[in-house]
Image (cartoon, rainbow, N blue to C red):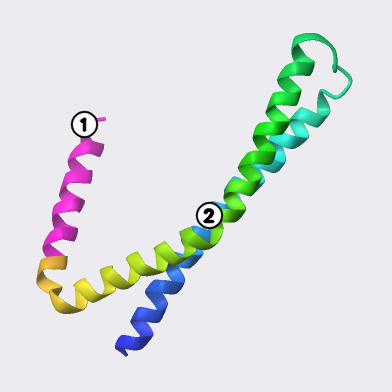
Amino acid sequence: MTAKKSEFSSEAATAGADQLIGEFKALMADAEALIQATEGHADGAIGSIRSKALETIAGAKESISGFEGVITDKAKVVAQGADDFVHRSPWEAVGVAAGLGLLIGLLIRRR
């Protein structure tokens, strides 16, 4: 059962990283579509802003493709570490979770 839990934690972390990357890619596509919508205004300040934005988006796309694998691998490592900690020290994990829950509750109550 421990292997199953570890596998689930790694899958959940990978799914979270994949979701974040997917949302970033969707944001990039939306920004690109917005920039393409200004295609008729290629002169003056708008033209230079469009060019700069397109260059920035191209650079960001390259960066995200390079980081995609790294982020997924790090998410798996973090999930495995958390899973190991919970299995080694279950009561400490409960205490940490309770403390964080209390802190978050206090912060939410103040707003």
Q: Is residue 26 above or below residue 111?
A: below
Of residue 99 and residue 69, the one placed in the foreground of this image is: 69
Residue occupied by mark 1: 110
Amino acid at the residue labelled 2: Phe
Side of 26 where 9 appears, left or right: left
Q: Indicate the quadrant containing the C terminus: top left, top right, bottom left or bottom right.
A: top left
Residue located at (35% from left, 79% from top): 6
Along the viewing direction, whichever of 33 and 54 lies nearer the viewer: 54
Q: CA distance from mark 1 to mark 2?
A: 37 Å
Answer with the quarter of the image where residue 27 lies.
top right
Residues rendered magenta in the picture? 94-111
Q: Quadrant of the N terminus?
A: bottom left
Q: Kindly identify which numbered label has been placed on residue 67.
A: 2
Identify the secondary structure beneath mark 1. Answer: helix
Whether 95 is among the magenta residues is yes
Q: State which mark lies toward you, 1 or 2.
A: 2
Residue 107 vertical position relative to residue 70 in the rendered view, above or below? above
Sooner in the amino-acid sequence: mark 1 or mark 2 = 2
Magenta span includes 36: no
What residue is shown at x 15% (from left), y 78% (from top)?
88
In x, y percent, where is residue 54? 73, 32
Quarter of the image holding residue 38?
A: top right
Residue 92, image x and y in percent?
Answer: 10, 67
Q: Residue furthest top?
A: 44
Magenta stretch: dominant SS?
helix
Residue 99 visible, this orientation: yes
Please name the residue shown 16% across and 67% down the image: 93
Report crowding for label 2: few under 14, some 14 to 19, many 20 or more residues within 10 A (C-alpha): few
Residue closest to the eye, 70 or 76:
70
* Residue 22 visible from this viewpoint: no
Name the kind of residue labelled 1 in the image: Arg
